[in-house]
Image: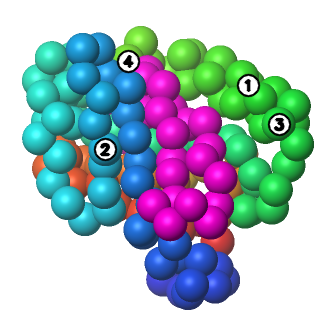
Amino acid sequence: MSVSTIAPAKIEAYRATHYRVCAPGKAFTLLIGIPSGELSQLYLATGASCALFITADNPFGKMQSDGENLAAHSILGEELRALTNHIYDGQGGDPTGVWPEERSYLALGIGRQTSEDLGECAHQDAVVWAGDDAIPQLLCLR
């Protein structure tokens, strides 16, 4: 998609978000456009060469109840477990604290197109994806 219908301020907020991963033995944070040594290490340990960071919380950036978010998170987890054995809990967090943290997953071995498809199914504006360079990038879906 070359032109996004997402407001530029919202895209900038997504770019500034801290995407935290709870990996075995060490938690780490992914930042858009910054190479992640920790993600590279996970690739080496698992044989993966790409990763998806995704949430099902608050579809299209509209606040939902905790129960609705939890149910969507559970369904997304089932979908991811059908695709890979390498899934880690995470949280997307606004460093300014204006937007609440969102339950998320880091799933290894999920290709770009499948990542976009999963994000669209979860009614998200965007997902974070990294290729074999372990540089997280924001993929706008609308």
The CA span between labels 4 and 2 is 17 Å
Looking at the picture, does residue 130 appear above or below residue 95? Answer: above
The CA span between labels 1 and 3 is 14 Å
Instruction: Please report contact status of discs 1 and 2: CB closer than 8 Å, yes or no.
Output: no
Q: Amino acid at mark 4?
A: His
Q: Amino acid at mark 3?
A: Asp
Residue at image mark 4? 86
Q: Earlier in the sequence, mark 4 or mark 2?
A: 2
Q: Residue furthest front?
A: 97
At horizontal 31% and vertical 57% (from top left) the residue drawn is 31
- In reply to whether residue 115 is colored magenta, the answer given is no
Kind of element beneath mark 2:
strand
Looking at the picture, does residue 57 appear above or below residue 22? Answer: below
Residue at image mark 2? 29
Q: Amino acid at mark 2?
A: Thr
The boundaries of the magenta stretch are: 87-111
* Image location (x, y in percent) of residue 4: 58, 82
Instruction: Please report contact status of discs 4 and 2: CB closer than 8 Å, yes or no.
Output: no
User: Residue 126, located in which quarter of the rendered image?
Assistant: bottom right
Q: Earlier in the sequence, mark 2 or mark 3?
A: 2
Kind of element beneath mark 1:
helix
Q: Amino acid at mark 1?
A: Ile
Q: Which mark is residue 75?
A: 1
Q: In which quadrant will I find the C terminus? A: bottom right
Q: Earlier in the sequence, mark 1 or mark 3?
A: 3
* Image location (x, y in percent) of residue 107: 42, 30
- In reply to whether residue 90 is colored magenta, the answer given is yes
Kind of element beneath mark 4:
loop
**3 vs 105, nearest the viewer:** 105
The CA span between labels 1 and 4 is 17 Å
